[in-house]
Image (tube, grey):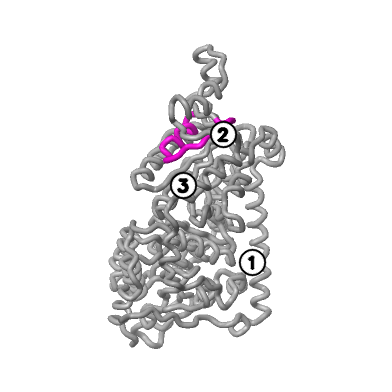
Amino acid sequence: MAKVILKPLGSPLPSFLPPDQSGENQASMEVLETDLSNRRGEVESGWGEKYVERVHQKGKLTTWERISHLKDPGTRVFPVGTFVNYGLTFGEGGRTSPGAGVVTAYVKVHDRWTMVIANDNTVASGSWWPLSPEKIERAQTMALRLRIPVVYLVDCSGLYLPEQARTFPGAKGAGHIFKMNSLLSARQVPQIAGVFGDCIAGGGYMPIISDVVYMTEQAYMVIAGAALIKGAKSENITSLDIGGADVHVHLSHCADVRVPDDEACLDSIREEVGRLPSSGADYYRRHTEPMPPRFSETEISSIFPADYRMTYDVRQVIARLVDASLFWEVMEHTGKEMICGVGRVGGLYAGFIANNQELQDHPVSRSQKRPGGILYREGIAKIASFSRACNDDGIPLIWLQDISGFDIGVEAERLGLLGYGSSLIYANSTNETPMVTVLLRKASGAGYYAMAGLPYDPVLQLSTPITRLAVMDGKTLSIGAFRTKLDDNFQILSDDPEERKKIEGGMKAVEAQIESDMNPFLSARQMDTDEVVCLPDIRSYLTMIVEACYQSTGYRRVKNPRIWSLHDLDVVVGKS
């Protein structure tokens, strides 16, 4: 009978990294982590204290105060999409939309992970801005994939009309939110809505398909507000008269329960979540308690070199992510540029696939070495097989990316890397087990796609302050852009000083542009990644998302570890 044997992994930091080097790495990372913390605080403050006071004067809580009241005491909120629209301004007045005017976050309620989607009522009364619909839909998609409850905290005055052309139409415009409501309902994913204030047009439609709708005495849901009706029909009435709790709870029955205020509404939502089936996570832990790693996750910041071109030992990173720093490495004697294995995170099994940065022996020529962080034939076949096995066994799969791309050249083409890559892409495209992607550092070229980048629907993709997401680095791309002007050694061909100066300037401009585009906050701003987190915070996010993967039972097959396909795979490959 097969049994999962997890072995100790990693070693104390001083044993593999001199103190001066780890100190330099840590100091460099602290600057980036402080910057990340400041930016996060800037977004969470919305439009500032003036608008917080306006909310309080109406007798209401701010969005973050509502979330704080809703969550289980002592638990942490895990935001996603924090930096959507970060740094952008709209219209002649230069308005900002922190977080696209909506908070989306994993929040634990009655020991169950929920996806909370809440309009930020300190930003234009919770209006929808460009990318607000897409951000809401991304959160709904996460909940649909994991079958976890969705809680809508609705306080939305509809579209921010000056930008309506960028939110109203389109395949993923505001209307797609309501399709996602419908898909969630069709898949029996619980949806609970609290309506706290303005709920106009699309904001009125969003809660309706929910299983239970609560309304406070200040709330109203209308297709068109009082101002629009007064202009169209010359009727002098208030929005509460049109669609308040009196109307929708007692006459239209578009809402279920009226409650006096925000606090009562949130308490009622908590009670609703408490009536749902309990989490399956403890069942799948198999009497195993969550344990912290033997080596602190705070040390991960010291492992990554300040210079992104330098290598590090990714096994030491994994040792600071998995419970008790115990790990079962699978197929370790082949495709050594890739690391595959299983560890527990928060007491629950998860598969890991990571790029090995260290130099590797060539499989044929013993006199040659190959750089790590690149996909070769053996590694591609290895991780494709591991990905399929994790899917077959129902194990969540975590991808730790630090990849420069696929191998290139005559040998790579003759070995059929295109075909092997296609096999890997097919595996990841058809997997039903939840996948989580972490862009540790480099996420380059087709390697980013092949290792379950965002286009391949991971349930969550995280970036870090040192993530570099792009086809290739700026210098390489500038050479490609000006290749016809360069010789075989990539030196400028022209002898004309003016032309040389022009080419040099053009190459530097391209390089600077690409390096700027690699900024992780730019990726997060345009929703090319879900969240930017500090390196030591990766374990916390993984612990949350892995538990969320095991929360709901019955929608995917989670095999007993004794009958995992991974055992067969490990035996077949052998220990040569």
Residue at the disc numbered 1: 29
Q: Residue 483, position in %: x, y?
A: 45, 60
Residue 172 location, x and y as percent? 41, 41
Residue underneath mark 2: 216
Q: Residue at x 48, y 70 (%)?
A: 347
Q: Residue, x 42% and y 76% (percent of image)?
A: 337
What is the three-letter code of the residue carrying label 1?
A: Met
Residue displayed at 38% across by 78% down: 4
Q: Along the polypeptide, which appears first: circle 2 or circle 1?
A: 1
Kind of residue at badge 3: Val
Is any part of residue 494 visible from this angle? no
Q: Earlier in the sequence, mark 3 or mark 1?
A: 1
Badge 3 is on which residue?
A: 150
Say if 565 sits above or below 553 in the image: below
Residue stretch rendered in magenta on the structure: 201-219
Asked if labels 2 and 3 touch by Cβ distance under 8 angstroms, the answer is: no
Residue 190's disc is none
